[in-house]
Image (cartoon, rainbow, N blue to C red):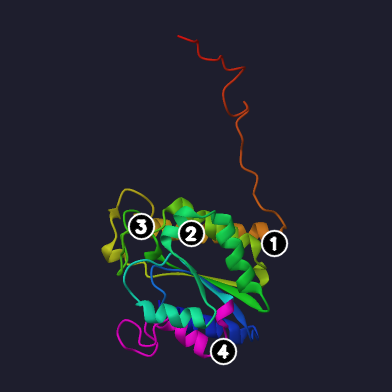
Amino acid sequence: HSISYPDIKGWAEANDYDDIGLIHFDCHADTDDDGLCGFEFDHGAWVKRLYDSDLMAGENYTLIGPRGFWPGPDTYEEMREAGMKWYTAMEVAQFDLHDIVTDAVQRATDGTDAVWISFDIDVMEPAYCPGTGEPEPGGLIPREAIAMVRDAVKQLNPDHFGFDVVEVAPQYDASDTNSYNGGITSGFANRLILEVMGSMALAEQGRTEGSPIKPKEPLGPKGDLEAPADD
């Protein structure tokens, strides 16, 4: 995930963005000063480096999906003091998805020039996306993740928006040599990118949904349902 730091910095410099918002889907906060391995631009420290660069204010950052035992409470306390916000994976399962996304978008767009969405594949439940280096039980399911990313992108300005999906590790994936995607994790990452592009197209047209083909017959049972007989 360390690649996101130079990606975002270069994107901001190329477009003359002084302040950006970040919506971060991840199992881990990536805000620890030393990261996981002690490197300055470690994949567990890139958000901290971005914050330290003054390109992103804490109030413009929202983390979605953290769980597990890293980083520790001291790091989360520092995040709280910086104005950062997060919704744990358990809260994603309990709260309304649209409410979470809308809050994250409002925070990310408040006084900023553009918004980046960074999606670490380890935010997902490993049963659906095993192909990553830091799997952690209890993650998001594909339906939740797709719905949230679609919703977020459609609420953003497609002309001032960036996205990445990271930490897909094909060598750890569950192979699927009989399909086009080669593995279930790679297949999901591919689907997520397609969903982002489709949602950007809808946003450019001022639309919230496409034009799905509907069945000729109305959905649901035909006619009046008979009440069950009293025994």
Q: Please name the residue that numbered disc 4 is placed on.
A: 54
Residues under numbered marks 3 and 2 in contact, where contact means CB atoms less than 8 Å apart: no
Query: Label 2 amino acid?
Result: Leu
Q: CA distance from mark 4 to mark 3?
A: 33 Å
Report the side of 65 relative to 104 (left or right): left
Query: Label 4 amino acid?
Result: Asp
Image position, residue 168 (x, y; %): 36, 67
Q: Please name the residue that numbered disc 1 is placed on.
A: 204
**Picture layout, residue 65 above or below residue 216:** below
- Identity of the residue drawn at 56% across and 14% down: 226
Q: CA distance from mark 3 to mark 2?
A: 15 Å
Local crowd at mark 1 within 10 Å, few (<14), some, or many (≥20)? some
Which of the two discs, 3 and 2, labels the residue nearer the N terminus?
Answer: 3
* Identity of the residue furthest to the right in this view: 206
Q: CA distance from mark 3 to mark 1?
A: 32 Å
* Identity of the residue furthest to the front in this view: 231
Q: Which residues are magenta?
A: 31-59
Q: Quick check: is 65 in the magenta stretch?
A: no
Report the side of 115 relative to 5 (left or right): right
Residue 125's tag is 3
Local crowd at mark 3 within 10 Å, few (<14), some, or many (≥20)? some
Q: Please name the residue that numbered disc 2 is placed on.
A: 192
Q: CA distance from mark 4 to mark 2?
A: 29 Å
